[in-house]
Image (cartoon, helix red, strand yellow):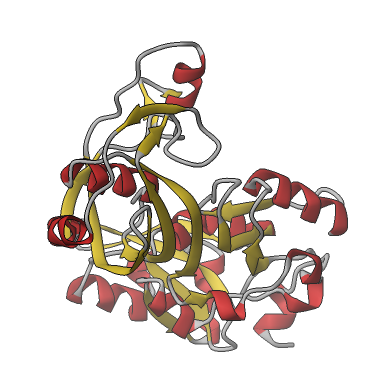
């Protein structure tokens, strides 16, 4: 009997992820709720990186035990195509908000002149209408109670920022950025820098890490047979270190043996303890995640029975 036979789950619960092409006009929450109705009863479903209701594009939907991997999926860089309308700013910085400020339209030259200052490592204040926490509470919840909310600046990285079109009122922007970057805030800040005001009117996420829009499923096509799982190459593309264990070590990992006693992992600890480690069996099945700790490794999560 093989180690895979011993460790096989008693019930074939669905787990993995979908790359979904979220349509505009629906919240990420409602899309998840619609999937829950179509898949197994009681199944855990989550997502890695929400999209506002007016936005569309790549949404990673996590199924079953893969919901525990949300932070690792969300850490990946993202790409967007944004349409920014100049002339006035809304309270939500998007087309669903109320106008709160007006200013003259910028020239193309003024717009092009400020874009380089928003490329690279920058400090950005999230929108007041956002899910960031302020003293343990979501910012948007405070705003809805009438509080004056000003989220603190935080570091983000804009790796690519290009002006693709400008008709005098609306600009098409291409943005490649780090986790945590708000494109609504970017539109606000670019407009202010060139003496105007603006808000987003359209947003499309074109990729999230290695997952591309052209490969995404329409929500109605998300059937169990199309679930994806992480392999070594995808884990690497998400920025994780990877390690493949032989059958005996995979069994030891699945049963919680101290990682210092698993040779392939202990050696990594002595060489490079920077970032999380995705651990796989020789059959290519994800066993779990380890985190660096004092030059070695500690368990972050184990997919029980996954060896």
Q: Where residue 188 sits in the image (x, y, percent)? A: 30, 42
- Asked whether, in this view, residue 119 is left or right of residue 89, the answer is left
Q: Where residue 148 sits in the image (x, y, percent)? A: 35, 14
Quarter of the picture holding the C terminus: bottom right
Residue closer to the observer: 30 or 171? 171
Quadrant in which residue 241 is drawn: bottom left
Q: Residue at x 35, y 50 (%)?
A: 180
Q: Residue at x 12, y 56 (%)?
A: 117
Quadrant in which residue 82 is drawn: bottom left
In the image, is residue 101 above or below residue 280?
Answer: above
- Asked whether, in this view, residue 224 is left or right of residue 267, the answer is right
Q: Where residue 123 sits in the image (x, y, percent)? A: 18, 45
In the image, is residue 118 above or below residue 262?
Answer: above
- Which residue of the protein is positioned furthest toward the top in this rendering? 146
Residue closer to the observer: 223 or 292? 223
- Asked whether, in this view, residue 256 is left or right of residue 165, the answer is right
Can residue 258 be seen by looking at this rendering? no
Residue closer to the observer: 139 or 37? 139
Quarter of the picture holding the N terminus: bottom right
Can residue 238 be seen by looking at this rendering? yes
Q: Residue at x 24, y 30 (%)?
A: 152
In the image, is residue 32 above or below residue 281?
Answer: above
Total marks in image: 0
Q: Where residue 189 sits in the image (x, y, percent)? A: 24, 43
Q: Residue at x 60, y 46 (%)?
A: 53
- Asked whether, in this view, residue 183 is left or right of residue 69, the answer is left
């Amino acid at each position: 009997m093989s180690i895979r036979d011993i460790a096989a789950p008693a019930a074939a619960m669905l787990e993995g992820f979908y790359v979904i092409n979220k349509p505009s006009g629906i919240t990420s929450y409602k899309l998840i709720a619609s999937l829950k109705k179509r898949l197994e009863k009681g199944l855990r479903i989550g997502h890695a990186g929400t999209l506002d209701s007016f936005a569309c594009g790549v949404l990673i939907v996590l199924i079953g035990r893969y919901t525990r991997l949300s932070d690792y999926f969300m850490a990946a860089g993202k790409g967007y195509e944004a349409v920014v309308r100049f002339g006035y700013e809304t309270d939500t910085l998007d087309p669903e908000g109320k106008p709160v400020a007006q200013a003259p339209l910028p020239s193309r030259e003024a717009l092009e002149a400020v874009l380089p200052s928003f490329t690279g490592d920058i400090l950005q204040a999230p929108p007041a209408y956002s899910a960031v926490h302020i003293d343990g509470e979501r910012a948007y919840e405070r705003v809805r109670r009438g509080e004056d909310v000003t989220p603190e600046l935080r570091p983000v990285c804009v790796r690519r920022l290009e002006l693709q079109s400008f008709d005098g009122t609306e600009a098409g922007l291409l943005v490649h950025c780090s986790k945590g970057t708000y494109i609504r805030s970017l539109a606000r800040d670019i407009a202010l820098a060139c003496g105007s005001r603006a808000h987003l009117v359209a947003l499309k996420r074109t990729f999230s890490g290695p997952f591309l829009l052209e490969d995404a499923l329409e929500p109605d096509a998300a059937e169990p047979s199309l679930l994806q799982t992480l392999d070594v190459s995808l884990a690497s593309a998400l920025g994780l270190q990877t390690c493949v264990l032989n059958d005996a070590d995979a069994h030891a990992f699945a049963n919680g043996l101290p990682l210092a006693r698993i040779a392939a992992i202990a050696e990594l600890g002595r060489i490079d303890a920077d970032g999380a480690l995705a651990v796989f069996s020789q059959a290519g099945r994800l066993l779990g995640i380890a985190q660096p700790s004092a030059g070695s490794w500690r368990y972050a999560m184990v997919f029980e029975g996954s060896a």
